[in-house]
Amino acid sequence: MSEDDHYFTAAPASADERRRVRVRLAGREVEVEVAPGVFSPGGVDKGTAVLLDEAPDPPPTGTFLDLGCGWGPLALTLGLHSPAATVHAVDVNERALDLVRRNAAALGLDGVRASTPDGIPEAVRLDLIWSNPPIRVGKVALHALLRTWLPRLAPDGVAYLVVQRNLGSDSLQRWIEADLAMPCRRFASSRGFRVLEVRPAAR
């Protein structure tokens, strides 16, 4: 990936060289398509693996969100666990969204819907958010992203975010509690990552 070709751009400049890899999602071996110019093009990254290992299994139904989906490991896992749920996979990267659509179709996951952030109506409330958020976009952009999506949790909803400890997980926890007035606790720690659990603000 070139210096200017970040995974959080809409149209990556790197060659769209697709390849298939085998990964373990939702307790089973599956084959997925990955490509350069997308977050973690080699497979499941360490942070996402921690979230997959530590987060509770999703409920069987509901409206779920994978925020910053990349090629889709979180969205696909949610879809495999809960085929009756609607899983929104959101990213600004069009190549990532295409990969999610292709991977979901190959796995027969009709409930997985990949779109840019503006593709989800504002009225939609989320029962579950799983995210390995793009910390490297910078604090201002990251806070704007979380300020947009975390308050869209349903009253009984919950979010699980995985953040590397040395990239500000503890300060992010404090910011969520102070700025969004949403209860946020350290749910798990593993391999240098924290999993933060976020609940809706009290009404």
Image (cartoon, rainbow, N blue to C red):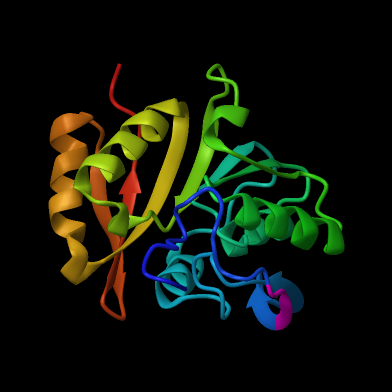
Q: Quadrant of residue 106?
A: bottom right
Residue 143 showing in the rendered view: yes
Residue drawn 49% across and 66% down?
39
From which residue to which does the magenta span run?
A: 17-21
Direction from residue 134 to residue 95 in the image, left or right? right
Front-most of residues 199 and 25: 25
Front-most of residues 19 and 84: 19
- Residue 78 covered by magenta stretch: no
Residue drawn 25% across and 44% down?
184
Can you say whether 156 is above or below 4 in the image?
above
Front-most of residues 105 and 109: 105
Direction from residue 112 to residue 6 in the image, left or right? left
Q: Quadrant of residue 199?
A: top left
Can you say whether 2 is above or below 55 in the image?
below
Residue drawn 16% across and 41% down?
175
Image location of residue 102, percent across then percent down: 79, 59
Can you say whether 10 is above or below 183 in the image?
below
Q: Quadrant of the C terminus?
A: top left
Image location of residue 153, percent across then percent down: 45, 30
Direction from residue 80 to residue 92 in the image, left or right? left
Badge count: 0
Direction from residue 17 to residue 145 in the image, left or right? left
Q: Quadrant of residue 41?
A: bottom right
Image location of residue 62, percent across then percent down: 65, 36
Residue 81 showing in the rendered view: no
Front-most of residues 30 and 10: 10
Instruction: Name the magenta segment's main secondary structure.
Output: strand
Image location of residue 13, percent across then percent down: 54, 62
